[in-house]
Amino acid sequence: EWMRFLNTASRLYKYTFPEQLLIYAQRPEATAVASMEIWNQKMYRWIKKGSKGIALIDNTSGSKTKLRYVFDVQDTYKVRNLGKDPQLWNLPVEGEQLVADYLQEQLSLEDTEGGLAESLHQAAKESMQEWLPDALEELRLDVTGTFLEELDEDNIRVRFRELMINSIFYTLSRRCGQEPMDVLDDDDFIRIVDFNKLPVLSFLGNAVSKQCE
């Protein structure tokens, strides 16, 4: 289930984890999501009759929480002579080495013969380096009542780090049109069961979302 969620999140990296989770719960196949105003006014696309919006929580009204609705591109159609198609980024095969080289240069990664997959895996590891110590301090505040509670600090660090790296790599791979399970297997996500309360699951999800973005 976590991997299926990451499939959806990989296409919607501009949304927060709570928003990605709500989109996944309602429209897991969504590819390009925006408000009615954006579809109408910027893309010149109308919402199809009978389409059901994807409900997201709107926290912009102070203490009063309400819902706002977004629509997937599949819920829309183009205005004649004006409508635009969203430019969905994708990575052609001939561009894979360019991306791998760029990541190696920008993140000072080790030279590798593993191509884009290995560069993405290194990038996932690199994203954790400086951020991990502070993240663990915050995570430990929320472990009460979870399967993490009985673990010592070293075990929490190992489990959190491995799950983070694998989740980031999986999401980046999907975004680039790769098959992450050529590198990973199902057991690499087994530690998700330790995050069995909303606070720690939210912490993990927010962390993965921010690092991937």
Image: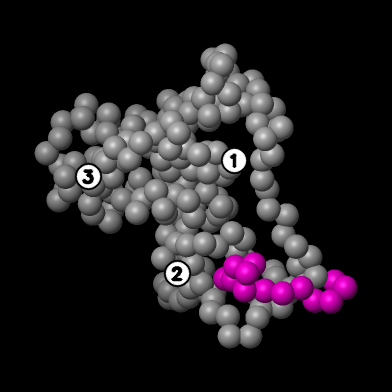
What is the C-alpha distance between the residues marked 2 and 1? Answer: 24 Å
User: Pointer 2 and pointer 3: residues touching (CB < 8 Å)?
Assistant: no
The percent coordinates of residue 205 (x first, y second) are 39, 49
Identify the residue position indicated by label 2 in the image.
26
- SS at badge 1: loop
Confirm whether the magenta stretch covers residue 74: yes
- Quarter occupied by residue 163: top left
> Does the image show residue 31?
yes
Q: In which quadrant will I find the C terminus? A: top right
Which amino acid type is shown beneath numbered disc 3? Answer: Asp
Give the quadrant of residue 46: bottom right
At x 19%, y 41%, the residue is: 148
The residue to which callout 3 is attached is 194
* Residue holding disc 1: 176
| CA distance separating discs 1 and 3 | 29 Å
Which of the two discs, 2 and 3, labels the residue nearer the N terminus?
Answer: 2
Frontmost of labels 1 and 3 is 1
Q: State the image coordinates of residue 130 (x, y, percent, origin top left).
A: 43, 26
Which region of the structure is painted magenta? 70-82
Local secondary structure at mark 2: helix
x and y percent of residue 167 in the render?
41, 40
Q: Residue at x 71, y 32 (%)?
A: 94
Q: Residues within 10 Å of mark 3 (few under 14, many from 20)?
A: some
Q: Residue furthest right?
A: 81
| Residue 123 in view (yes/no) | no
**Is residue 158 shown left or right of residue 164?**
left
Q: CA distance from mark 2 to mark 3?
A: 25 Å
What amino acid is found at the position of numbered circle 1 in the picture? Answer: Cys
